[in-house]
Amino acid sequence: MKLNGATALVTGANRGIGAQFALDLLARGAKVYATARRPELVDVPGAEVLPLDITDDASVAAAAELAGDVDVLINNAADTAGGSLVTGDLRAIRSTMESNYFGTLAMIRAFAPILARNGGGAILNVLSAVAWTTVEGNTAYAAAKSAQWGLTNGVRLELAGQGTQVTALVPGPVGTDTLYAFAEREGIEIAPDAVIAPADIVALALDGLEAGDVEVLDPAGVSAKATLSGPPQIFPLSR
Ligand SMILES: NC(=O)c1ccc[n+]([C@@H]2O[C@H](COP(=O)([O-])OP(=O)(O)OC[C@H]3O[C@@H](n4cnc5c(N)ncnc54)[C@H](OP(=O)(O)O)[C@@H]3O)[C@@H](O)[C@H]2O)c1
């Protein structure tokens, strides 16, 4: 998928990895819709800013109406604070599933016909290495990411016929404010060399997207995938 001259829509572009995607897509010559539930917080010069809550059907439909020229959809937005499955707040658990799974699905359902009209295009879903393991303190998030992985594989199968490339980005820890806030809350000391910078993971993702890769893994993603051939494991976050 050639990004120079493409038209991309990024969800959750007001901070973290999403903001990095929007900036880097522009740098690679794409037109960019930088979307957020709080569009006033988007700081991506050169992007077209749209309001979008991926868990709100009317909001998703309005974005699809306004962005009919999209041929690259970056599903980045997610609630990452699910907490613990057995003892945590059920609303937080549902919210994590609602955004990671149903929100991503809503975006794909709304934009699949647009991608088809525009020549097939590509979808990139931002998953996580914890989808293939689990993680201390945030098992609900890991489970939602596992569901999103299954969704990604299913959608790839269903959209192959219309020529839409479906790519999974599977990173380990990425150095965003959200990751460091989580580590501080949980009293986890993350080894600095275990964290990839947002700019590095996005460069890897966009290179993979351009190369037509179905999965793009950083080193932590590679290690997590390798665990699938053995007994279930916990993602090693702490040093
Ligand atoms: N950081 C990591 O270590 C890491 C590792 C692997 C994968 N990931 C994945 O990478 C993606 C981004 O992570 P991040 O660290 O950049 O997270 P972040 O800084 O917490 O950003 C999350 C983004 O998603 C948006 N969002 C949440 N729910 C939404 C909804 N219903 N509709 C629209 N936007 C919504 C947030 O908007 P608000 O500002 O309005 O809340 C924010 O823009 C997520 O899918 C995450 O699971 C992160």
Image (tube, rainbow, N blue to C red):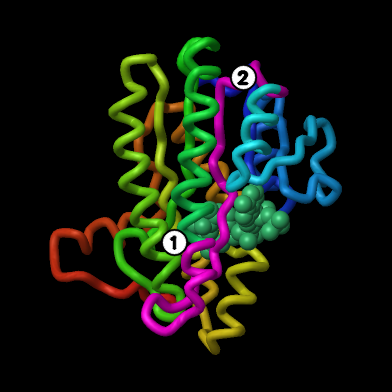
Label 2 or label 1, whichever comes before in sequence order: 2
For ligand 1, the image quadrant comes to: bottom right
Give residue 86's mark: none
* Residue at screen point 35% across, 48% down: 149
Relative to 44, say whether 73 is above or below: above
Q: Quadrant of residue 56?
A: top right
The reply to whether the residue tagged 1 has its Cβ within 8 angstroms of ligand 1 is yes
> Which residue in the protein does label 2 denote?
6
Looking at the rendered structure, the kind of residue marked 1 is Gly
Looking at the rendered structure, the kind of residue marked 2 is Ala
Given the current orientation, which residue lies at the most extreme bottom position? 187
> Which residue in the protein does label 1 denote?
172
Magenta region, residue range: 66-95
Element type at mark 2 = loop
Relative to 14, say whether 46 is above or below: above
* Residue at screen point 40% across, 42% down: 168
Element type at mark 1 = loop
Front position in the image: 208 or 50: 50
* Residue at screen point 46% across, 58% down: 97
User: How far apart are the alpha carbons under marks 2 and 1?
Assistant: 28 Å
Q: Position of residue 210 (x, y in %)?
A: 48, 27
Q: Residues within 10 Å of mark 2 (few under 14, many from 20)?
A: some
Count the numbered circles shown: 2
Q: Can residue 220 be seen in the rendering of this structure?
A: no
Judge whether residue 127 is colored magenta: no
Q: Residues within 10 Å of mark 1 (few under 14, many from 20)?
A: many
Relative to 89, say whether 55 is above or below: above
Front position in the image: 194 or 17: 17
Q: Main secondary structure of the magenta part?
A: loop
